[in-house]
Amino acid sequence: MSTHPKPAPKCRREGSCKSLSSRMRCHTSLISHVERGRRTPTLEFAEAADRAFELDGHFVHLYRQISQSPALGWFARWVEEIEPQAVILQSWDPLLVPGLLQTPEYARAIFSTTSPPDRVEDRVQARMRRMQIFDGPSPPAFLALIDESVLDRPIGGPAVLLDQLLYLQKLSQHPRITIQLVPVAAGCVVGMISAFALARLRDGTEVVSADSILSGHVTGDHDAVAQLKVRYDSIRADAHPQTVSQRAIGDAIRKWSK
């Protein structure tokens, strides 16, 4: 977690997992599923983990941050635990500017149609705070693949889109951010299924998130990670180089400025 400098201990070997399960009084499969993101931990699980590792509320703190993040919902684990620990982030979005690169107005236009009115501002602010990962001493490298059609989709109206494109142009100059557009002509059937993101953490762990209109999922499952990595590489093979993408963003800015 970004609010706790000490990384959570992990069960790496079968023997240590058996020992941990004995101390926590739970099955080894439960520990494995929680560690890989397949199961959401309960408060009792977090308390047992703190006792087993002799930690002063570390796992309970993680549990409460995740469970008490209504502004983020299922995505809380990705935002609060994965992104701050990432060395490499990769995302693909066929419909929108990625959340990490959105302006407040663009994000507000999205949330105003997908969230209860009393939750919109909380979600906008939560989204804006995500950019803080680039302010630290070791920010991640972020590669964003965006479908070219996003430049012509006036989310929030022409003025909101224009400001978003200007911000996108500015971010494309950031030394840790690479933005590549995927041309409409590429077809990109493999990428039309959903938006998704991949992360490689400091300890080498790889995690993915994928969302749809009804649900989302964050997991470190090996098969899921491998499948989305192949899909990402396939999409990126059709993407414009960064310099061509920057020119296309500039062309879109001139179009929406008229």
Image (tube, rainbow, N blue to C red):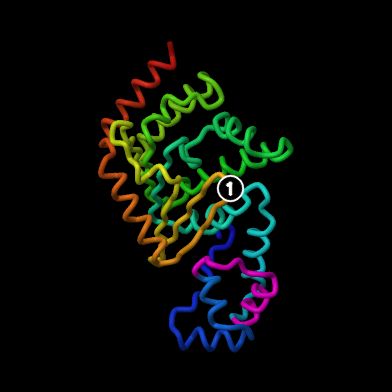
Towards the viewer: 107 or 51:
107
Q: How far across and down, in percent of the image, does residue 254 sit?
A: 38, 16
Q: How far across and down, in percent of the image, does residue 178 sit?
A: 34, 41
Picture mark count:
1
Q: Residue at x 47, y 50 (%)?
A: 136
Q: How far across and down, in percent of the image, does residue 200 sit?
A: 39, 59
* Looking at the image, residue 174 lies above or below residue 23: above
Q: How far across and down, in percent of the image, does residue 37 sit?
A: 52, 65
Towards the viewer: 190 or 243:
190
Give the residues in magenta.
36-52
Pick the quarter of the image with the C terminus: top left
Q: Is residue 61 magenta?
A: no
* Looking at the image, residue 44 lies above or below residue 23: above
- Name which residue type carries label 1: Leu
* Looking at the image, residue 10 lies above or below residue 95: below
Q: Residue at x 57, y 32 (%)?
A: 104
Q: Secondary structure at mark 1?
A: loop
129 sits left or right of 172 in the view: right
6 sits left or right of 190 in the view: right
Pick the quarter of the image with the N terminus: bottom right
Neighbor class of circle 1 (other Cα within 10 Å; few <14, some 14-19, many 20+) is few
Q: Residue at x 41, y 66 (%)?
A: 205
Q: Is residue 45 magenta?
A: yes
Towards the viewer: 161 or 52:
161
Residue marked by disc 1: 214
* Looking at the image, residue 175 lies above or below residue 136: above
